[in-house]
């Protein structure tokens, strides 16, 4: 008897929870859950009008989120400015020392660039290196346990295609994984799902760089067993996927308990503008 | 003057919603790493749980649904996942409201743990089994655990905010 009463009670509660709109509520919970499930099932349509509507919705939300995030950004910017002021003297000393080194390296670099072009011409190699790029503003930076990405204010209207390489300064930081009409999403190389073909110099060792979710270090996979990789070796994109240009610097090697890791050159928390490369 | 008063009253009435949207829009700010695990605090779970339990009349389900969609776009999740999560919390709190007469922080805290475990499971099932999106299980579990731990602190803060809002609204009515 009491069990029946309990069951009736539960049914009444469930009905009232799902169907009653309640005070000041315009929708019942059941209606909204059904709408959510319908929207979720529409994710299976990756093309056609549904996809276009989804892209427009994403564009609108991303653009308005950017406006809403301005106060938070200004707070973190102010904090960074204050920290930068404290570190100014140390930075100045460091820069003074590196300036002379940099000038020498630039001259050396120009020499090697010209030599490389000349040699490539000799072996008639297809030039993957591409200087065509858009400078785009980062609208939002998204960090979660499953996602390390940036949202930028250029989309396929501007010719941005999936897989395009993205750089910050001279360093490779990721590739385009989602392109809406006016906005795009960059998957950073630090993301768990990021796998980039790389080459380690000196030695020209090919491997795959995997993101770990950490902003500082990435992991190197599929290394040959007998390799002579040393701490401080430089990691570049290999260009073997045929989409990303070769020779873009990514980071330097760190050997940590027999694990080969990459210390990224770029601090992903400090990116405001990026260069998205495209082919004509 | 009356227009200013009306606007102020309306602002107070939608204040919980504003806090929810701020937490969704700035979700990237509540992340940190611990022991090589990347944790994500789900402040929005706490806000939705707290206000839909205490004052559902100020917390429209439509807004919660929209906040979920917003979160999905920002987090690059399939659209609708977060809405289902958030609305599931509302379903659970609505059950509790009907079943429990006296509420206190400890009961709420324990029930919050049960709620976020259910919602976390829904999240995991949808993302991993339906959409094949890889998730680090440890990070998800640790994130939920830390969210559970900070609940009392945030609940106290939100109670304090709620009291201020209620006092202001009552003052307006009395005038």
Image (spheres, coloured by chain):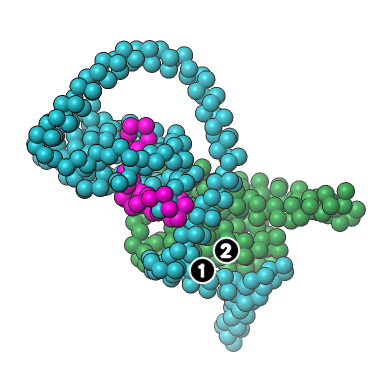
Chain colours: A cyan, B green
Q: Residues within 10 Å of mark 1 (few under 14, many from 20)?
A: many
Q: Which residues are magenta?
A: A157-185
Mark 2, residue position = B65
What residue is rendered at 30% in x and 46% in y?
Answer: A280
Q: Indicate the secondary structure of the residue bearing disc 2.
A: helix
What residue is rendered at 67% in x and 54% in y?
Answer: B16
What residue is rendered at 33% in x and 62% in y?
Answer: B132
**Marks 2/1: CA–CA distance:** 8 Å
Q: Nearer the viewer, residue A262 or A236?
A: A236
Q: Is residue A145 visible?
A: no
Q: Residues within 10 Å of mark 2 (few under 14, many from 20)?
A: many
Q: Indicate the secondary structure of the residue bearing disc 1.
A: helix
Q: Find residue B137 and report its horizontal and vertical position in percent.
A: 37, 54
Left or right: residue A7 versus residue A279 is right
Q: Nearer the viewer, residue A150 or B174?
A: A150
Q: Find residue A196 and report its horizontal and vertical position in percent.
A: 25, 45
Q: How many marks?
A: 2
What residue is rendered at 34% in x and 12% in y?
Answer: A97
Against B4, residue A254 (above or below) is: above
Chain at numbered mark 2:
B
Against B31, residue B115 (above or below) is: below
Q: Residue furthest right?
A: B175
The question of residue B136 being in magenta is answered with no
Left or right: residue B5 versus residue A65 is right
Label placed on residue A36: 1
Q: Nearer the viewer, residue B16 or A80?
A: A80
Against A8, residue A69 (above or below) is: above
Q: Is residue A201 visible?
A: yes
């Amino acid at each position: 008897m009491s069990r029946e009463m309990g069951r009736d009670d539960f049914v009444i509660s469930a009905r009232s929870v799902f169907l009653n709109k309640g005070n000041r509520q315009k929708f019942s919970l059941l209606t909204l859950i059904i709408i959510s499930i319908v929207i979720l099932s529409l994710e299976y349509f990756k093309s056609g009008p549904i996809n276009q509507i989804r892209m427009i919705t994403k564009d609108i939300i991303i653009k308005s989120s950017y406006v809403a995030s301005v106060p938070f950004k200004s707070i973190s910017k102010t904090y960074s400015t204050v920290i930068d002021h404290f570190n100014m003297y140390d930075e100045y000393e460091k820069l003074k020392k590196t300036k002379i080194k940099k000038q020498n390296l630039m001259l050396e670099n120009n020499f090697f660039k010209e030599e490389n072009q000349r040699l490539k011409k000799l072996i008639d190699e297809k030039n993957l290196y591409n200087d065509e790029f858009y400078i785009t503003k980062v609208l939002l930076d998204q960090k979660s346990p499953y996602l390390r990405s940036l949202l930028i204010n250029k989309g396929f209207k501007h010719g941005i295609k999936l897989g395009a390489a993205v750089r910050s300064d001279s360093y490779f930081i990721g590739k385009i994984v989602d392109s809406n009409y006016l906005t795009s999403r960059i998957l950073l190389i630090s993301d768990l799902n990021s796998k980039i073909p790389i080459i380690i110099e000196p030695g020209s060792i090919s491997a795959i760089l995997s993101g770990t979710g950490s902003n500082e270090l990435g992991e190197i996979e599929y290394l040959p067993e007998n390799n002579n990789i040393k701490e401080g070796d430089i990691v570049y994109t290999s260009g073997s996927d045929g989409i990303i240009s070769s020779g873009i610097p990514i980071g330097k090697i760190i050997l940590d308990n027999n694990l080969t890791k990459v210390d990224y050159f770029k601090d992903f928390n400090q990116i405001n503008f990026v260069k998205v490369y495209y082919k004509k | 003057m009356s227009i200013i008063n009306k606007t102020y009253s309306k602002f107070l009435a939608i204040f919980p919603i504003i806090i929810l949207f701020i937490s969704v829009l700035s979700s990237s700010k509540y992340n940190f790493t611990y022991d090589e695990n990347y944790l994500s605090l789900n402040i929005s779970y706490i806000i939705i749980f707290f206000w839909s339990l205490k004052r559902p009349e100020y917390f429209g389900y439509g807004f919660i649904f929209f906040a979920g969609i917003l979160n999905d776009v920002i987090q690059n999740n399939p659209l609708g996942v977060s809405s289902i999560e958030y609305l599931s919390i509302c379903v659970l709190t609505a059950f509790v409201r009907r079943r429990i007469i006296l509420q206190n922080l400890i009961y709420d805290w324990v029930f919050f743990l049960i709620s976020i475990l259910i919602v976390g499971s829904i999240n995991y099932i949808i993302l991993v089994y339906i959409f094949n999106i890889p998730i680090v299980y440890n990070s998800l579990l640790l994130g939920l655990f830390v969210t559970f731990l900070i609940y009392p602190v945030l609940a106290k803060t939100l109670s304090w905010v709620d009291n201020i809002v209620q006092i202001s609204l009552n003052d307006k009515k009395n005038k």
